[in-house]
Image (cartoon, rainbow, N blue to C red):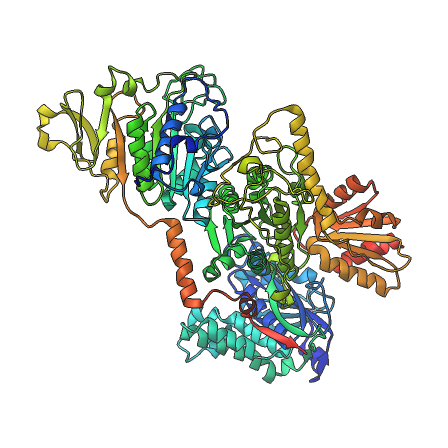
Amino acid sequence: MSEAPTIDNSETEQVHTVAIRFAGDSGDGMQLAGARFTDASAIFGNDLSTFANFPAEIRAPAGTLPGVSSFQVHIADRDILTPGDQPDVLVAMNPAALKANLMDLAPAGIIVINTDAFDERNLARAGYAVNPLEDGSLDAYRVLKVPMEDLTKRALEGSGVKGRDALRSKNFFAVGLMTWMFQRPLEPTLEWIASKFAREPEVKAANELAFRAGFNLGETTEMFRHTYRVQPARLPAGTYTNVTGNQALAWGIMAAGQAARLPIFYASYPITPASDILHELARHRNFGVRTFQAEDEIAAAGAALGASFAGHLGVTGTSGPGLALKSETISLALMTELPLLIIDVQRGGPSTGLPTKTEQADLLMAMYGRHGESPLPIVAVATPADAFEVVVEAARIALKYMTPVILLSDGYIGTSTEPWLLPDLATLPDISVPFTVAPNGPDATFIPYLRDAKTLARPWAVPGTPGLEHRLGGLEKDGAGNVSYTPENHERMTLLREGKIRGIAADIPDAVVDADDGADVLVIGWGSSYGAILAGVRRVRAQGKKVARIHLRHLNPFPPNLGAVIGGYRRVLVPELNRGQLSRMLRAEYLIDATSYPKVQGQPFKAAEIEAKLTEMIG
Amino acid sequence: MTTGAKYTRQDFQTDQEVRWCPGCGDYTILASVQNFMAEMGVDKEKIVFVSGIGCASRFPYYMNTYGVHAIHGRAPAIASGIAVARPELSVWVVAGDGDAMSIGGNHLIHALRRNINLKILVFNNQIYGLTKGQYSPTSELGKRTKSSPSGSIDFPFNPVSLALGAEATFVARTIDMDRAHTTEILNRAYEHKGSAFVEIYQNCNVFNDKAFIALTGKEERDLNRIPLVHGEKVVFGPDRDRGVIIEGGTARIVSVADVGIDAIHVHDATAASAGPAYALSRLSHGPFGPTPIGVFRSVDRPVYEETLQQQIHDAQAKKGGGDLAALIASAGTWTVA
């Protein structure tokens, strides 16, 4: 076992990046610990990326492997793209947390262990026959043994908080210790505790004491004479905040309402990992946001569509199983040609699958998962901060083309954070579409399906507008909107609806190609694999190899230049957290021999995986 | 009801050819509703009809107002979005028994409990008409249909009991053939603040003819209609010699002479407890004998969208209209020079 002397110089070591994973039982407060450390690092000025990994159960049996919850934060003095393939430091609050996370730890990484939890019972629950602290199995790592529970209890003596209640503060002890080890400022965490527990003075005092005790332990004990410093990152100038994907989506929805000059109506049914969007929007009644917690996924889509008919921006959010239930309503939105924004924060499927883990396997459902010929636009979010802009773009398309639009995010984006350069709201595009208020047909009649010659969008006349009373419905109609069952008409209308969506390609930007001259291999990604792909590409380039990269925001229709760009490369690699859904779409659209690089483990790609695959392809 | 004569029935007719089977009860209901809309006096651009799928659900095509012919069972959900987004609109839902209580049962009960200002008209013909004659969730036990050749083994819903159990604030029953009564009930539903559930017995002369003969037949109707009049004793029959008493929560039909007029139940549609209304609804399970007609329940409860509007108003009064830039910056920021 490594003893303290292996790191006993009292120097502060400068490092460029470090990834720290806080791991414990799902009741140990590890998500909160990670978030506090992250915020302090953000305010310190590091670039960062985080990854939350937690069980589907609210409280899985204590001390067991399924009950382990972890939060990884990657901090750097430069631009980083992922939460880190391997943590450099593992904080393990119990044996199960050690066992579940040790295989990910970097070689010779640091393990900070809460030794108080390593008793016979917890060792047995984690499936350890022998105590790993005593059998030499951790010799390859730097192990720091800290009796966190005992030290927390002692720190709280005299505070009035005792026993099991005192142990609740041990996550703050761990944050304090890491705050010292990585030389973070104390103030952000202390301020957070003070504001969060302002109404519970005992809890506030206990958490402060535990936090300071953790910090002081590092400062005063021989065992911890080594600290690390990650300098602030040289990010572009401006004001930043740390944001999760779900939060950025919620704010983006509100921004879309302002950009469209329409009230927001968000209808949703609780579902992991999309519920946080509903929670965030429900807090902002003063913005005029209407949230509607529906009785089921179907009703959520229906209510949002009703609101759109009534002239609001109707939005519904869900995850995979909910998208399946909404498909009937999405088809009605498509048939009635009303704007509707559908957000799918994807998770591992099928069925309940891996509700708290990430996956990108709903792309083909978004593309084809409806009855009849029912094409609609699809956009995807690449990073937590990107969500803000993408949702405004989705709303732009929905309103301009009078169509439902599916926005794909995923659990990884939804719960991860990254620094976000605050947007200048004055530069939001004007995506407003005027309601039709005057008759458009002969004899002062209103023809609800009289199309704009360029966009093929039909007019949007909302209830309350005199003289434009009209009926929409799911039955096939003729060009004017009257029900029609004639064979030729159905084909004509099917082609019209298809052409409207296809035509959007002329109204979206070309795909940006990040290419080395002379590159043979093009890697095409979408969604949350953005960070891992770009990081992998950078590593390959650092080896002197040439590669080209495209990351798609628009998945239907594809950007207009995509086919031509693809034609310029000998090989195309498509990494996805599914079994090859985008690669199928690319093959079908462009008749190319795309190489799929699928992964379905409920976890994001690692940069090293992309690097290895690209290295193998480029040779 | 306003007396504004600005509309006639013709103003609510559309250029669409009405395509129900000749003799269908829906024609009578359409005429009653169009007449009532003219009397109601609400600007027709502020009226929205929403329907699902089924024979009854063609209704919006024939109403010259705003309308959505939507998805089977989903009309209450879509109408909820319209009403919550735009509380100033008069939103009407038209559904059949299968649409409202089978595929759309969940949406119906939740719209009722929320007390969204929707007027839900359920045309109950106790059969699936559009799909040509399968038993519905209100068909009687033992009914032989294409999908139940040996007799239905599905115990039916009592729609009024269902609505009362779903915490509806307004529950009524009327009959397609009785246009005066239908109009009166439509008016009561319109004037009610919140969701109104109106069951309309509707004859399907093709697949379930004479299902309501006990209430519409010349000889039977006076024997079997139990008129519910708020504040009055529940008596019925050609000689008003039969009545209803409620004992231990159960309603029973008695001879008035046997119990004395003082023992007869006085109908109170506004009673705090839904118990007596529920007891009355259990007097019949399908219109095969004496069946109450009229308003079972009409009580005040906060209307969903008005409360939501109030929350928005209160939040704006307290925090101001909302500054998105300030909100985004509220989670803690740092500046890179």
Instruction: Decide if residue A40 is in sight here.
Output: no
Q: Position of residue B24 (x, y in %)?
A: 41, 20
Residue B111 placed where, x, y %?
40, 42
* Location of residue A329 with respect to A312 vertically, above or below: above
User: In the figure, is residue A534 to the left or right of B168?
Assistant: right
* Callout count: 0
Residue shown at 86% from the left, 53% from the top? A521
The residue depicted at 42 percent of the width and 63 percent of the height is B315
Looking at the image, residue B281 lies above or below residue A263: above
- Quarter placement of the N terminus of chain A: bottom right
The quarter of the picture where the C terminus of chain A appears is bottom right
Res A610 → quadrant: bottom right
What residue lies at 75% left-to-right and 52% top-to-bottom?
A525
Along the viewing direction, whichever of B132 and A205 lies nearer the viewer: B132
Q: Out of A205 and B314, give the one closest to the viewer.
A: B314
**Residue A432 lies in what quarter of the image?**
bottom right
Relative depth, front residue between A236 and B320? B320
Which residue is the extreme one toward the front?
A: A443
Please say if A237 is above or below A21: below
* Residue B9 drawn at (x, y percent): 39, 31
Q: Residue at x 57, y 79 (%)?
A: A186
**From the viewer's perspective, is A383 left or right of B219?**
right
Q: Position of residue A408 (x, y in %)?
A: 64, 50
Does residue A471 appear in the picture of this structure? yes
Q: Quadrant of residue A450?
A: top right
Q: Work out whether residue B226 or residue A611 is closer to the camera in this orientation and state it.
A: B226
